[in-house]
Amino acid sequence: MGERKDRPKVIVIGTGGTISFDGRHGLDTYEYMEFGTRHDIDTVLTRFPELDAIAQIETVSFRTLSSAAVSPCDWIDLVQKIHDLAEGGGGPDGFVITHGTATLEETAYFLNLTLKTSIPVVLVGAQRPKNALGSDAGPNLVNAVQVAASPEARALGVLVVLNEEIQAAREVTKTSTHRLETFRSPDLGMLGYADADGRVAIYRRPARRYAPDCEFDVSGRDGLPRVDIAATYAGADEAAISAFVAAGARGIVMSSVAPGLVTPQQRDALIAARSEGVVIVESTRAGSGRVLRRTSMHEQGIVAADNLNPQKARVLTMLALTVTDDPERIQVMFELY
């Protein structure tokens, strides 16, 4: 790529995912993970020379994983990698992280709570491999670099960019298995657009606290406290909750029925888990809306997840447990972050 000095510098960190794949042919949009070819980030970017007009690109090959294989240890390593690159000589104007879409929202929220840099960080993925008909890989990547390089992206926390839409890491979630418009921010909506003319249009700013103004520090850690998610459904019993406690869970997030209810058997198991010091957080499987802390939850020391979905409530609970196991302090964190 060229070296025109008037362009901002963007570091693109590759972690794998659909955006790194070529399928067997143009119609291979769902079996490419088993039969296609995965490429490193350098090879991915050579497919899209349009990036050269936007920024000076530097690539870092971090992982080559399916997003289903990403773990909290990968999150911790990724935070350290970003910090190392940010603190090095000639730091970038922005970071783009290519990521599989299945757990992209969890990685984004973790970074949103743990990064100690104000340099914009944008996560991007694709719903179709880059050689598929109608692939979104190229447009998404161009838009992500465009946003990461822009002054408008500063002081917004970690961002997610797909389908020309800019979303806040805390609020965005994957809502469709295969559709291109899969990433949505239920109830609250996106922050703005990455337009085809190169402009970045922001219409609102997140109000909850985000990087780098967060209390969580994962430097030097080799893992996070175990937190599991248990689902509520008609007739659910205590088996999953008891198994998680036996496995050493320090926290359990309930994917409860709306507006934050569990079965009687689960309630008894949760009360027993609390007596052993396990932190209990009630989220909902509904997909939107808030779980409010009822009097009974307060009396039992159960935390309400507000409007965080179960997978993001788990992220915050893991980080909260690196600071405290007091449910009242953790409840305040759910109201701040």
Image (spheres, rainbow, N blue to C red):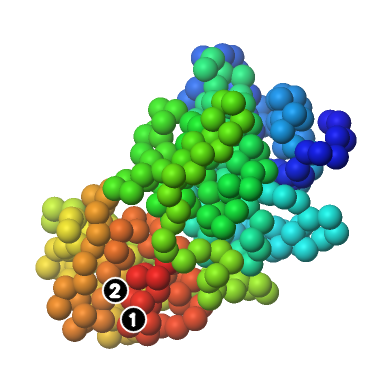
Q: Residue at x 60, y 53 (%)?
A: 154
Would you say 131 lies left or right of 321 here?
Answer: right
Would you say 261 lies left or right of 1 here?
Answer: left
**Of 249 and 199, which appears nearest the observer?**
199
Q: Which residue is drawn at 63% across and 67% down?
A: 116
Quadrant assignment for the C terminus: bottom left
The picture quadrant where one finds residue 264 is bottom left
Q: Are marks 2 and 1 in contact (CB under 8 Å)?
A: yes
Report the residue marked by disc 2.
Answer: 303
Q: Which residue is drawn at 36% across and 44% down?
A: 189
- Image coordinates for residue 315, horizontal then vertical, percent: 45, 63
- 149 is higher (above) or lower (below) than 113: above
Is residue 232 visible in the rendered structure shown here? no
Q: Residues within 10 Å of mark 1 (few under 14, many from 20)?
A: many
Would you say 9 lies left or right of 112 here?
Answer: right
- Image coordinates for residue 103, horizontal then vertical, percent: 48, 47
Report the residue marked by disc 1.
Answer: 327
At label 1, the amino acid type is: Pro
